[in-house]
Amino acid sequence: MTDAMALREELLPGVAGTLGAQLARALDDSGLACCRWKGQGRGDRWMTGRGDLDLLVDRASAGRFAALLERLDFKLALTAPDRQMAGVQSYVGFDRGRGRLIHVHAHFALGIGRPWVRYYRLPFAAAVIATAVPGAPFPTPAPEFDLLLLLLRTALLHDPRDALRRAEPVWLRRARAEWVRLRVVGRPALTVVAARYLPEVSVGTLGRCADALEPSCPTWRRLAARLAVERELGALSCAPAAGYRVRRVVAGVARAMNLLTPPAGKRLASGGAVIALVGADGAGKSTCARALRGWLGAELWAGHAHLGRPPRSLLSAVVGAALKVARRLDALRARSIPGGLHAHLELLRYVCTARDRYRLYRRARAMAAAGGVVICERYPLPGNRTLVGPSREQGRALSAHSGLARRLRRWETRYYARLTPPDLVFVLRVDPETAVRRKRDEPADYVRARAWAMWEADWSDSGAAVIDATRPLPDILADLRARVWEAL
């Protein structure tokens, strides 16, 4: 272990054994020039998945840096185009020890501001890296550069809406804490660094930026500091593409009217995936699906689809209402066998369910094609079609006998034939008696029969990964997370 790495682990022993510690050690061993250029005041939040790790990397070492992250099983993730800043790449890694995703922002250029409004590319990235000092667990900029960057970054965040808020923004309180830590630098030293590396910014503007961090500073003075920084950094600015602001306003109005739900999180550069969780009642599918969705959704664009209970279309609702009327009529006539209308409406309801499943499947596939990850429950597969498949394979709606019934069954079968296999399949296997004990809200015989159907299913040639679901839930989730991340 080098002296620098020993110092880092001594300063922050909590990183030992984590993915962050592995990354810091790998960077130290490789001699790759980089530093953590912002967020020092937020401690180790990034190690718990509650923040991003921003590393400023020598652009000549971009290839080596990407290869190093790939060896640690980090995956390249794509930010939404309207939030992408030139010279910045996002990587997401899985810390198996903590069960959390870690997000690394690799900055190959020194950019401040917001890409969807305006950002500024500062010309002294190499100097920041060259003068970096040992930190915990990554090197950090020299205090003079750290203070200069803090003042400029925070000045650009001041907003007229701050005057309407009851409390200060969280980012402002955090920036003030960092400013208190860095004030020991002193204005003379700050002025020397600014004059050498950023002569565009005057001493007076830096003073306004510092004053804007005072709790008693009025909003108008903070906005004046922002305008001064924007004016003096004008030659280094990058504006959004033409027409972007109009599109952003239109998208904002659509979101407010619930007409559009934009993708949240980043998309995997290697592509998305449809992941199916199958198993008997009581196997823990819903619990695991929610946990996986929350785990991936912390950083990536992730969704959930329950194909066993797809959203009902208007046609399904109409057929369901008609079926209830037919059942009531048969009950009034004391029929023990469904009448013709009842039998055909029941079959039509299964056709409508197949159609609803196909519609939900298409949405899941479209999301995966766009780079998202979709966790699916009750995905129709050959091994579980007796539970979620065509009505004939489930032994349902068999009393309808006519040419129309044959056409309806062919129609239903075609919907299921269009469902291509998911990218990943995990079978949560649990014995029937355990399923009965867990699923107490359903009749025991019903749960047992369905559990036996899944217990006897042969998954050996399906490519599915069989998970022992009789284990404690934390063990099952740890197994699933590791397998999912390895396969993505």
Image (spheres, rainbow, N blue to C red):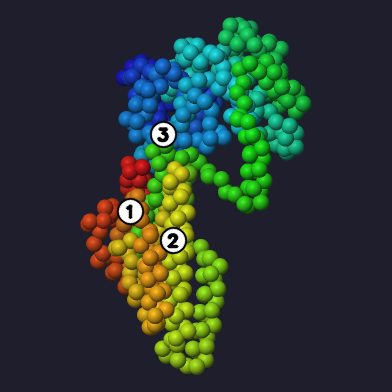
Q: Quadrant of the C terminus?
A: top left
Amino acid type at image mark 1 = Val
Q: Position of residue 106 (x, y in %)?
A: 46, 26
Amino acid type at image mark 2 = Tyr
Q: Nearer the viewer, mark 1 or mark 2?
A: 2
The answer for how far apart the CA atoms under marks 3 and 2 are is 31 Å
Instruction: Looking at the picture, tell me which residue is in the foreground, 214 or 369.
Output: 369
Q: Position of residue 398 (x, y in %)?
A: 37, 80
- The residue at 57%/19% (across/down) is 121
- The residue at 75%/34% (across/down) is 163
Q: Is residue 297 above or below residue 147?
A: below
* Residue with the mark numbered 2: 358
Secondary structure category for the residue under label 3: strand
Left or right of 465? Residue 439 is: right
Decide which of tag 3 and tag 2 comes sooner along the chain: 3
Q: Residues within 10 Å of mark 2 (few under 14, many from 20)?
A: some
Residue 76 is marked as 3
Decide which of tag 1 and tag 2 comes sooner along the chain: 2
Secondary structure category for the residue under label 1: strand
* Residue with the mark numbered 1: 425
Q: Residues within 10 Å of mark 1 (few under 14, many from 20)?
A: many
